Image (tube, rainbow, N blue to C red):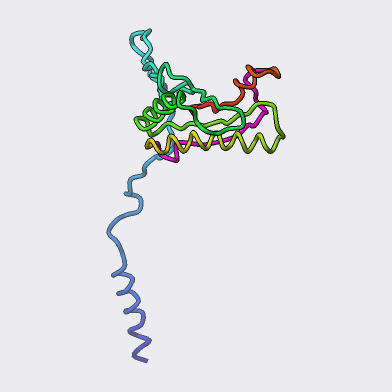
Amino acid sequence: MMTRRFLPLLLVAVLAGCSSGVKLSDVPVEDKSGVAVAPQQPTTPDTQSRVQPVQADLATDPRGGPANVARIVYFDYDSFVIKPEAQAIIDAHARYLKANPQRRVSLEGHTDERGGREYNLALGQKRAESVRRAMALLGVQDSQLEAVSFGKEKPAAAGSDEASWAQNRRVEIAYR
């Protein structure tokens, strides 16, 4: 009986304690909807371009490499031994690659038309590898060098004479 009398009083006391003095109608409302902004017009006409000129990076030039140095190493018939006269070419390219470690070269081995396809691919690879080893011995990082073979598929000179064959027995140094 006592609890029935105090229960409504307890309920009123709890509700009075939870009440807030802030009225919901007094809360400021912010408008967060988008507002279109008109682009500003320049007050004076600007006729000069603000684009900076582009500097060509010589490192990405496919013709890069040491200036005035040949890019072809020639070989004797059925040989992958580097001739003494080609050593200066390899030295110059090796010095350039050591000074420019971001540059990469593809050493493309070629042969003349004599011999079978597989034989010429293997000989072209041996020629490219011999140039790669020579450059590596001079201090060029192996990651800068790639040796590939084209065999007899990309002749420099058409013809079936010794002059044409001599031009086709080569390694081309191609910068990438």
- Up/down of 8 relative to 91, above or below: below
Position of residue 3 relative to residue 16, above or below, is below
- Taking depth in this image into account, of 84 and 89 the one nearest to the observer is 84
Residue at coordinates 50% horizontally, 27% vertically from top-left?
173
Q: Quadrant of residue 12?
A: bottom left
If the image is split into quadrants, where does the N terminus sit?
bottom left
Residue 122: x, y in percent? 63, 38
Point out the residue furthest to the bottom here.
Answer: 1
- Vertical arrangement, residue 52 with respect to residue 3, above or below: above
User: What residue is drawn where x is 41% and y is 24%?
Assistant: 88
In percent of width and height, residue 54 lies at 40, 18
Between 5 and 51, the one lying in front of the other is 51
Asked whether 56 falls inside the magenta stretch, the response is no
Question: Which residues fall within the magenta stretch?
Answer: 140-158
**Front one among 141 and 80:** 80
* Residue lying at 44% horizontally and 40% vertically, measured from the top left: 142
Q: Is residue 71 left or right of residue 111?
A: left
Q: Would residue 133 appear left or right of 49 to someone viewing this image?
A: right
Q: Looking at the image, which residue is at 40% across and 40% down?
A: 32
- List x then y, in percent, for residue 121: 65, 36
Q: Is residue 143 magenta?
A: yes
Determine the image quadrant of residue 98.
top left
